[in-house]
Image: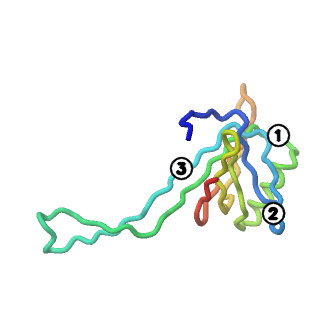
């Protein structure tokens, strides 16, 4: 197996617009895709008889984190409008990031926010925050 690093050129972010059979729409204008905040929760199990008074823990539930997608904002773009409709509905949908030659991270996600930014001297952007619900499937 090769250990060659990759860069983001050609990567895509897609979301399901039809559940069955699943039909994905590729989000236009994507500049970056960031998976963040995944963690395993821990619960303290220290007792009065724990050796040397050093805290002990067990693993508990897992939080799969969020996906932050930064895009150029294209007013009236069909893919950005469709994702806004999914945000307004508040329901989880299937999503995937495709990177490298053909690798994917697929998951169910809830669009928490879509923030538009209009700076004076730079292109307008759209910042999308998605809460991952359930496991991420790597392929």
Q: Nearer the viewer, residue 72 or 5?
A: 5
Which type of secondary structure does the marked residue at label 3 adopt? strand
Mark 1–mark 3 distance (CA, rounded to whole Å): 25 Å
Q: Earlier in the sequence, mark 1 or mark 2?
A: 2
Crowding at dot 3, Cα within 10 Å, few <14 / some 14-19 / many 20+, comes out as few
* Quarter that holds the N terminus: top right
Residue behind mark 2:
22
Residue at 72% of width from left, 61% of height from top?
94
Which type of secondary structure does the marked residue at label 2 adopt? loop
Mark 2–mark 3 distance (CA, rounded to whole Å): 26 Å
Q: Nearer the viewer, mark 1 or mark 2?
A: 2
Looking at the image, is 122 positioned above or below residue 87?
above
Mark 1–mark 2 distance (CA, rounded to whole Å): 25 Å
Residue at 69% of width from left, 58% of height from top?
111
Residue 49, how many percent across, how many down? Answer: 13, 74
Residue behind mark 1:
74
**Extreme-front residue of the structure:** 1
Q: Are marks 2 and 3 in contact (CB under 8 Å)?
A: no
Residue behind mark 3:
36
Residue 112 sits in quarter: bottom right
Q: Nearer the viewer, mark 2 or mark 3?
A: 2
Q: Earlier in the sequence, mark 1 or mark 3?
A: 3
Looking at the image, is 103 positioned above or below residue 19?
above
Crowding at dot 2, Cα within 10 Å, few <14 / some 14-19 / many 20+, comes out as few
**Extreme-bottom residue of the structure:** 48
Q: Earlier in the sequence, mark 2 or mark 3?
A: 2
Q: Which mark is residue 53?
A: none
Residue at 69% of width from left, 37% of height from top?
31
Which type of secondary structure does the marked residue at label 1 adopt? loop
Q: Nearer the viewer, mark 1 or mark 3?
A: 3
Residue 123, how many percent across, how many down? Answer: 75, 31
């Amino acid at each position: 197996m090769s250990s060659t690093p990759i860069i983001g050129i050609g990567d895509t972010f897609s979301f399901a617009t039809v559940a069955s059979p699943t039909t994905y729409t590729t989000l236009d204008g994507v500049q970056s895709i960031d998976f963040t905040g995944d963690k395993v929760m821990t619960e303290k199990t220290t007792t009065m008889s724990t050796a040397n008074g050093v805290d002990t823990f067990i693993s508990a539930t897992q939080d799969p984190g969020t996906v932050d997608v930064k895009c150029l904002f294209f007013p009236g773009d069909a893919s950005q409008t469709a994702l806004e409709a999914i945000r307004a509905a508040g329901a989880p949908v299937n999503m995937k990031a495709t990177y490298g030659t053909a690798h994917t991270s697929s998951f169910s996600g809830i669009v928490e926010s879509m923030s538009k930014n209009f700076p004076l001297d730079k292109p307008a952007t759209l910042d999308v925050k998605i809460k991952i619900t359930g496991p991420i499937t790597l392929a």
